[in-house]
Amino acid sequence: MTESPELTEQPLDLLYSETEDDLRAAVRALLADRAGHQTLLGRIETESPYVPGLWKSLAGDIGVAGLLVPEKLGGQGASHREAAVVLEELGRAVTPLPYLTSAVVATEALLAVAGEGDAAAGLLAELAGGRTVAALAVPLSTAPDAGLPSGGTVTAVADAVAADVFLVPRADGLYAVPADEATVVPQTPLDLTRPLATVTTAAGSGARLAGPDAARA
């Protein structure tokens, strides 16, 4: 009996590499030093649960914000395994930080359109260096074939209060809207470590990063 190609491929290595273990140790040590449970409990019911300066240390000094960004675009050129290590440690310490929203979700959206112009690549470099925090603001539609609006309000945007820029899909493309051009109204989430907000952007605000096909994707 001949085995299928899928069965003869080399098995997936589920063990962490030395590099991944080193990354985990660095993130864990930083969180233990700067974001212990007493520190987090003292901030959790305030307007901003984020520990001041922690994002800069984690994203910029350790360099985790650019793990998924290729080196040619200013990132580390790592894989989702390394990003998962960071997410595991943030979850282990229950640390409020915009890592998933900015360094994973928004970064992946920008990577998908990075070939369409210099604007997306430039913003990726800002995210990779931890200098900018982005959040994807996607409107929910009741009809699967409905078009994207030219502007409007999006509810329950995670980490919107920490974002410097919003990635907004519209009918004519994907836009980067600076936070100071948007209206952000905090909401009360069930999980106080995961701040949510309603984000409203006006039609025509921001800079277009890619065309309508990319926005729909």
Image: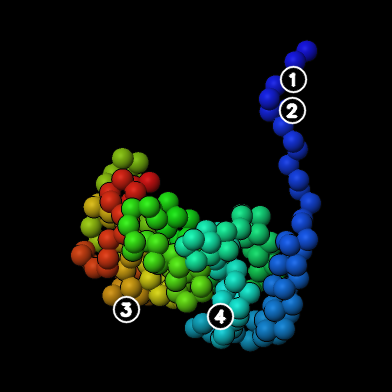
State the quadrant of the N terminus. top right
Mark 3 neighbour density, 10 Å: few (under 14) some (14–19) many (20 or more): few
Q: Earlier in the sequence, mark 2 or mark 4?
A: 2
Q: So how many labels did they put on this image?
A: 4
Q: Earlier in the sequence, mark 2 or mark 1?
A: 1
Q: Which mark is residue 8?
A: 2
* Measured Cα–Cα span from mark 4 to mark 3: 21 Å
**Residue at position x 40%, y 55% in the image:** 114
**Residue at position x 42%, y 51% in the image:** 112
Residue sitting farthest toward the front: 72
Q: Quadrant of residue 185?
A: bottom left
**Residue at position x 49%, y 83% in the image:** 47
Circles 2, 1 touching at the beta carbon (< 8 Å): yes
Query: What amino acid is labelled 2 in the image?
Result: Thr
Q: Quadrant of residue 93?
A: bottom right
Give the residue at mark 3. 180
Q: Is residue 131 left or right of residue 58?
A: left
Q: Which mark is residue 3?
A: 1
Circles 4, 3 touching at the beta carbon (< 8 Å): no
Q: Earlier in the sequence, mark 1 or mark 4?
A: 1
Q: Is residue 82 visible?
A: yes
